[in-house]
Image: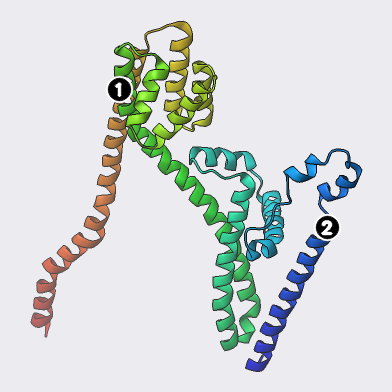
Amino acid sequence: MTAYQAWGVLVGGLAGLGIVLVVARLASMRRADLSVRVMPYLRDVPQLGSRRRPEMPRSAARGVFGPMLRSAAEAVERVLGGSTSVRRRLERADIDKSVHEFRIEQVLWGLTGFAVTAALSLIRAWQAPSDTLPLLLLTLVAFACGVILCDNHLSSAARKREQLIMLEFPVVAELLALAVAAGESPAVALGRVVQRTNGALSSDLSRVLAEIRTGTPVGRAFDGLALRSGLPLVGRFAEGIAVAVERGTPLADVLHAQAADVREAGRRELIESGARKEVLMMVPVVFVVLPVTVVFAFWPGLIGLRLVTQ
């Protein structure tokens, strides 16, 4: 394949892609909206047509590529599945997105990897035209890797937020216990703590406080927090508050005990992490420091033996 042929293939591919985009956009524009089709039969209810207008795309790029991205997101959903797991991780990471929006983001990550790999592969194909098929497979693998990396990024965000919640929990529990022991109700104590703290756990508690202020019972609001949380500790905390409110058990003692349990669990995790780090610290000692020490110890003797034998 010569350079002219490669440029011809590139220009032809771009022209074909442009024609496909134009045809797809024209097809979507010709499709009549449901309100437009039903409105002639609802002439006696004119206010329906004046309340809601068809939503316009926010940008030209979204209007052109939006239908294709949505179709690609639906295809990724059919291939990967696991919408329940994705929704759960989105809630744990406190990301205000739907599953479909996250699938579109996965497609964008995959297209980014595909575009970067395709650009590098095109340069390589000019130098070695016989490697076209492996390079094409490499671009497909890059798209799949982009999709998987987006999913791993979501899991990492959920884990980081859970770690922040674990760090914040003892302080928040102690503040709640002090406020309740001072004679305040659970809702008032929760509002006081939410106003004076910032963090991942505070945002979850602020959502619980909003539900309580809108009329949801305290026990049911904390039960919802236990269902949304991915941490057993927070689930036990919410269930303990719900049971204490419903049955009248001393809430301050429950909160103090849970905070002490969390601190003890954090202390054990720190000790275990330190033990693992000790093993990792032996790697440079064994594979770097020890060989260098052996070389410095035996190298003069080896030189001396060579001089004696000569």
Q: Secondary structure at mark 1?
A: helix
- Report which quarter residue 48 is drawn in: top right
Pick the front one: 185 or 78: 185
Indicate the quadrant containing the C terminus: top left, top right, bottom left or bottom right. bottom left
For residue 195, above or below residue 40 = above
User: Mark 2 or mark 1: which comes first in sequence?
Assistant: 2
Q: Circle 1 sits on which residue? A: 174
- Residue at left offset 59%, top offset 55%: 106
Left or right for 35, reference 265: right
Question: Would residue 145 be visible to someone looking at this image?
Answer: no
- Marks 2 and 1: CB-CB under 8 Å? no
Rendered location of residue 5, percent (x, y)? 68, 91
Q: Circle 2 sits on which residue? A: 31
- Report which quarter residue 6 is drawn in: bottom right
Q: What amino acid type is highlighted by mark number 1?
A: Glu
Q: Secondary structure at mark 2?
A: loop
Q: What amino acid type is highlighted by mark number 2?
A: Arg
Left or right for 145, reference 185: right
